Image (cartoon, helix red, strand yellow):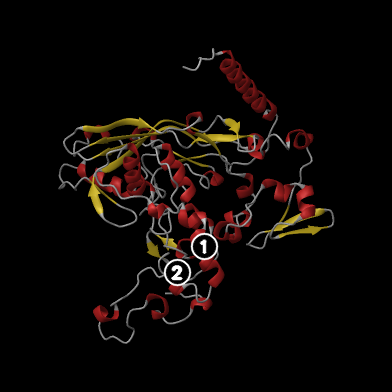
Amino acid sequence: MKIDENHSFKCTSCHQGNDTAKTKENAHIDLIDHPAHPKEIARTCMPCHQEISAEAPQSMHFTLKNSTNLFRKAFGATADIDSFTDTPTVVTPSTPLELGDDLLRRRCFKCHLYDSGQAYPSTSHGQGCAACHVTIVNSKLADHVFHAPTDAQCLSCHYGNYVGFDYYGRFEHDFNVEYRTPYTTNNDHFRPFGVEYHQLNPDIHQKKGLSCIDCHSGNELMRQGQKTSCTGCHDVRALKVQLPPRVSQEGNSYILTTHSGKKHPIPTLLHPAHTDYNETVSCQACHAQWSFEDKGKHFLRIDTDELDSFSALPVQGNYEIEKLLTNNFDYEKDELPIEMTDSLTGKRSAGIWLKGYITRRWENVSLGRDAQGKIAVVRPTLDYTLSWIDANETVQIDAVQSQTKKEGLRPYIPHTTGNAGVFYQSRLQQFLKLEQQAKNKLSSQPVTPEQ
């Protein structure tokens, strides 16, 4: 097992156990399988990496608190939680919020630093610090070299129709078997991310050879530092105030030196549109080539073994569910129990969570307003519907929708950057026209007197 120079010390320094024992059983007493796990960081990582070990556990990558709280509030939560690990455990839900908590713990919390990810070739990763800094291939440790994160590490969590996957031009197929082509392939595993994907146009930065960490530094991701912005690199006014990391000025030009050592001249804002729209329109409203638009996310918890209606949907982007459904649809095999694992405790409980969409599209880039009032790209991220059928085939909770504004649409930054092209104004004008029509309709409605 190859070890890097900075970590070339005794195995027991991190993994504990007993390196003087004569048998495997005795050697593995008190052994720690995942010494970089968040619960172990203070003991294993902090002695050498004090500052980052203290700050990282408060970062979004560790707590997931923003996305968790948004979801929980959409189903009735009245208070925030500090970390996704505080999501309550609920075996028998009685409210939509409790059902949502069960969904989070058993279906959603797979891409986090307390778990090793899905068991597909490209979606498994280490735990804690090792999730980003150690290479895992096919759920196995490739070596023991700690290194700067590669895009493969990022994509082990940022896959499916989430930001990161789009950077490479990937859009996940529908789940139904009839939409999941190709049916055959020469590759050993043609679903490395769990579900096949359409290959669309990648982000221009990816085409030029920039990796994720060339824009998103450890200071931003692990230390709550200043977030990367388009203007930080491309607006001369911002560059004159402060140069971003790895950016230098050479004469009248600005150069980005990537982690690979390659130098890239940075194009600055020259088109008149940037002056006209800089304060009112976000960059991606014009420059996004396409966008994730998965509408109507339906989640069904089903505790019964009557699953024939889902025979075309065993592939759901979830390894545990795929394994169970594939096995149980094979009538020559013994049925597996209808159970799923809690991602935080590792314990199994009754019921599995099935997922479906009303539509999955990319071609129309939807626009809305961000928190600053700028026109921005939006996507439906909170349009959830939850249902539950118990083991007696009784519908306990039936199609409860999330309570959100604007049909669950929220601003986001698609990583599909390209030339704005000749139709950017049409995109903006169409949005402004629809926005004005909505305002006119609202103002024409009669006001109901207060009782």
**Is residue 341 rendered to the left or right of residue 248?**
left
Res. 245 image quadrant = bottom right
Q: Is residue 19 visible?
A: yes
Rendered image: mark on residue 56: 1
Which residue is at the far right?
251
The mark found on residue 41 in the picture is: 2
| Badge 1 element | helix
Task: From the viewer's perspective, tell me whether residue 437 is left or right of residue 357.
Answer: right
| Of callouts 2 and 1, the N-terminal one | 2
Q: Position of residue 451 (x, y in %)?
A: 46, 17
Residue 310, image quadrant? top left
Task: Examine the rendered structure and indicate whether residue 32 appears above or below residue 137.
Answer: below
Q: Is residue 297 left or right of residue 5?
A: left
Q: Residue 138 appears at what percent x and percent y?
A: 38, 59
Decide if residue 160 is in sight here.
Answer: no
**In-front residue for pair 368/142:** 368
Considering only vertical position in the picture, is 42 above or below 442?
A: below
Amino acid carrying mark 1 in the image: Ala
Along the viewing direction, whichever of 93 and 378 lies nearer the viewer: 93
- Indicate whether 287 appears above or below 350: above
Q: Is residue 231 above or below residue 298?
A: below
Quadrant (top left, top right, bottom left, bottom right) of the N terminus: bottom left
Whether the residues at callouts 2 and 1 have beta carbons within 8 Å, the answer is yes
For disc 1, the neighbor class at 10 Å (few under 14, some 14 to 19, many from 20) is many
Q: Which residue is rendered at x = 38% and y = 37% of the image?
A: 180
Label drawn at residue 3: none
Identified by mark 2, the residue type is: Ile
Alpha carbon separation for disc pair 2 and 1: 10 Å
Quick one: SS at disc 2?
Answer: helix
